[in-house]
Each structure stands twice: as structure tokens, then as C-alpha cells.
Image (cartoon, rainbow, N blue to C red):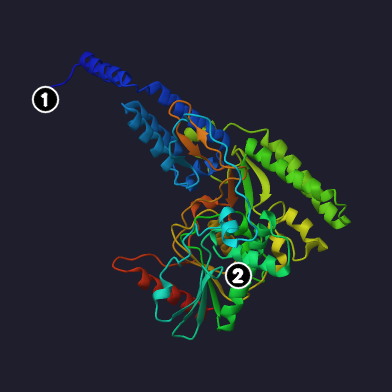
Amino acid sequence: MTVMRRPLLLAALTLTTLTAQARGYDAAAWQRDYAQLKKTLEQQYANLAWFASPEGGVNLPRLDHLTRQALQAARSDDEARRAIQGFVGAFKDGHFSVLPDQAAPTSAAPEVPARPFDATDPTASCAALGFLPTAREAFSLPLESLPNFRLMGDGLSTVYRSGLATMAGGQKIGVLRIQNFYKEAFPAVCPQGHAWLKAKGDRIDEKSLRDAADHRWFEGLAEQIDELKAAGMTTLLIDVGSNSGGNDSGDLFPRLLTDKPVRSSRLRMAASAAATAYADEQLKTLDAALKTSPPAEARDALGRAREFFVQAKAQAQQPCDMAWVWTQQRPWASQGCKRLVDVGHAGGFAATLPRGAFGDQNIAYRLSYPSSADDLWAMWSGPLYVLTDGRTYSSAEMFTAVVQDNHLGKTVGATTGGDGCGFMSGDKPKILTHSRLRLRMPDCMRLRADGSDEVAGIAPDLPVLATEGEDGRQRAVRALETIAADVLAR
């Protein structure tokens, strides 16, 4: 066997490096980009302490070592890019990702005038406001194809896709599909809202139409639940499989589906400018409510919330050093530096408020967003199940976790995708200086009842996993039979 002598090896490596540099590859610049990425994570990534713990499932010191090795071995921009992409992908956090590249602008972006709002044309006005079928409204399992299933709402002319399965044991399982937690993904809500405003003789403009669509989103749920109850529904299944998320309505919807008390998840943010901005936003809202001269009980609650966010803002401006994550793992329950700020709960300052709190819905929702619809709570009080899969993300995970942690019902299917909380102050990308790689990085985290991070995914109470040789129709049958058996075992 021939052994290359060290001087020859060094010469070969030097030649390779010079060749790469001649082609425009700058290894040192990529190393600086990686250092910039790690520093940005330390300062702004809300889930970093979770992934730095054994419970997080990622050995960050080893991942850092392997990434540095990969960058040292890289001989091209493509290889260096793959090293950093592999680092990001190892977190398995859907909100932390490398975004597609963008071309450099060749000229100033043109001014695009606003589209005129035509209040007389519901189709055009709703499309202009973004109310489009942007999410798949079909059930996540092909329930419609089963012989014992009756489709009652198509999710196009009706707000929700819905139907009723009659089981051999006599149970009637009603199914409602929530394909997204943005109302804009529901094609029917805007034209129905337009018709509702027109019937009342109310003014139709952009704001009133959005508000009317919001009203139809919730009222439509109540109407279709009532229709299912009239058809004999004894159990309700909410399908959030393949639901990519949305907004904070994932915290409100559980209250629409139960008559039990509901607590919102605890919310944390990275101690950063994003947390400061969020605290300022809350303070502005609370100050506006205090200026309305609310009654004493409400004024005291608003005052407590205000003091809480003043302290949260101060904590956001006194961060600790998270560089330890690249050299050691610390248990999640440890008291060391996590660089996280307590910013209340997913719905606001209060974990929960009773229905009709303070006798003023406008005051109550400033402390707990779900109170904005407390007149619609408890549309259902019977057995509740939630269908999830590996593409249930973000706000859909919020919804699922609230149902599970508050023991409102049971989850069935597969573990959710593991996005958790996303962005409380916008998702402006972070850009690495040399490579111009663009990354999005979540600034918030939601905590489960057991203290774990929602980004770990929500495991089902009743697993119904895909099995070899089984098609979707067979899995749909198994899911319904699993629910029916569980109801009988109560």
C-alpha cells in the first residue's frame, strides 16, 4: 500500500483549496456565516433551550461538531450550503427552516395601487380580500367513500365539510373538518358574510366584510353542529389532519366545542426585540382599555396585566448568554439560562376567564382572546375526539394540545408534525451575510400542561397509524371503529 507523505498531502490540500478559491468558494466566509447563525439562534430562537436539553432529542454539541467538520470538508458553495441546511433540518422544527433564495432586485419595486373594493360584487370583493380555498377542505381520511358515511356539508357551499358515520353499535359519529385556522381558507364564509350584511341593510366595506366573515366562521360551526345533532350525532370528531396552522383561533376553537372550563397554554418568548415589541403591543391594548373608564373589577384586572407586561418588557431587555448550548446539555427543568420571557398565555395575559367576564366582551378579550366569542362557547357538550396526523402543524397543534391538556376529549391518529409556536412579532427572515441564506426562526414557544415544549409534537391518546398493505379507506374505518370502541368503554 502506498502512503502519501505529509508534505505531499499538505500540497494536495493546498491545491484543492486554491482551486476552490479560484472558482469563487470562500470557506472562511461560510464559517463566519455559521457563526452568525449560531449567535442569532442564541439571541432569538425560542426553542433553543428545549433542543439543548436531553428531552429535546437533539444533541447540539454533537450537531455543532458535525456541522463544523462538514464545513471544513466542503470544497464548494453547494457543499457548504448543504452543511448548514443539514444543521437546520436536524432540529425538526417546521418553523425553523431555510427559505428559498431570492434574486437580487434589478430595479426598484413598482408601486401597485390598491384594488378598488366593489361592495356590490361578493365574488370579486371576497377574492380581493384573500378569501380563497387555499387549504384542502376534503377530510384527511377518505370518509366520504365509506358505505356507512353520509356527507352533509361539502365545505364549499357550506362553511365546513361535515358528515355522519353510523356505526354497527349504533353510535353516530359526526365529523367536522377544520382545514386551517385562518378564516380566509374557508371559501364560503366571505360570500355568506356579504349576504348577511346585505340582508341586514348594513354598510359593506373591507372591515365590515372581514368582521362578517369572522361571524360566519363561528356561526357556521354552530349551525352545522346543530344539523349533525338533529341527524342523531352522539359523538363529535374534529378533523385537523393535514392542517398547516393559522392564527390564535387554535386557542379559541376548543371553547366552542365544550362546556368545560378551558385554560390556554403558557406562552414564552425569546428575550429579544420581538418580546419587547410584543410587550409594547399588549401595553398599548391595555392602556386603550383603561382609558374607557372600566368598572373597578375590570380596571384592577387590566392594571395587573399592565404591570405584568411592564416586567416582561424589562426581562426581555436583560438576556443571559446561551453559548453553553454548543458545549453541554442541561435538563429542561434546570434553573439555568434559557433566555426566555414569560409573556402570559397563548390567548393573552389570562389563562382563562369565565363566560361574560366583567360584563363587557370588549374588556375581557383584551385579557384573553377567546373571550371575544364567549357568547358562542359550548356548542357541543358530548364526547369529543380530534383526528391528527403528521401534517398537523402550528395552530392546529395549539388546538390539539388545549383539547388534550384540558381533558376536553381524546386525540386519535398519529403524532402531529411538531411545529409548535411560530411568530408573535412577524416572521421577517434572518439573512446570513456571505451566502445570503434566508432563514425563518420562531420567537415563541407554548408549554404543555406537563411543562414540555409543544414543538415536540402532540402524541395521540388513541394511535391509529398507517400499516403496511392498508389503504386510506381501511385506515378511515379503523379510526372510526377505534372511536366507537372508546365511547362504549367510557
Compare residues 444 and 57 and report the one nearer the observer.
444
- At 43% from the left edge and 81% from the top edge, which residue is drawn? 148
Camera-near label (1 vs 2) is 2
Height in image: 324 above or below 23? below
Q: Position of residue 58 (x, y in %)?
A: 44, 43
- At 36% from the left edge and 73% from the top edge, which residue is drawn? 474
Height in image: 236 above or below 275? below
Q: Earlier in the sequence, mark 1 or mark 2?
A: 1
Look at mark 1 in the image and give the residue it sits on. Answer: 1
Q: Position of residue 221 (x, y in %)?
A: 60, 70
Height in image: 186 above or below 57? below
**Residue type at the position of mark 1:** Met
- Farthest residue toward the top? 7
Compare residues 166 and 54 and report the one nearer the observer.
166
Height in image: 308 above or below 108? below
Q: Position of residue 337 (x, y in %)?
A: 60, 37
Look at mark 2 in the image and give the residue it sits on. Answer: 221
Q: Position of residue 330 (x, y in %)?
A: 52, 40
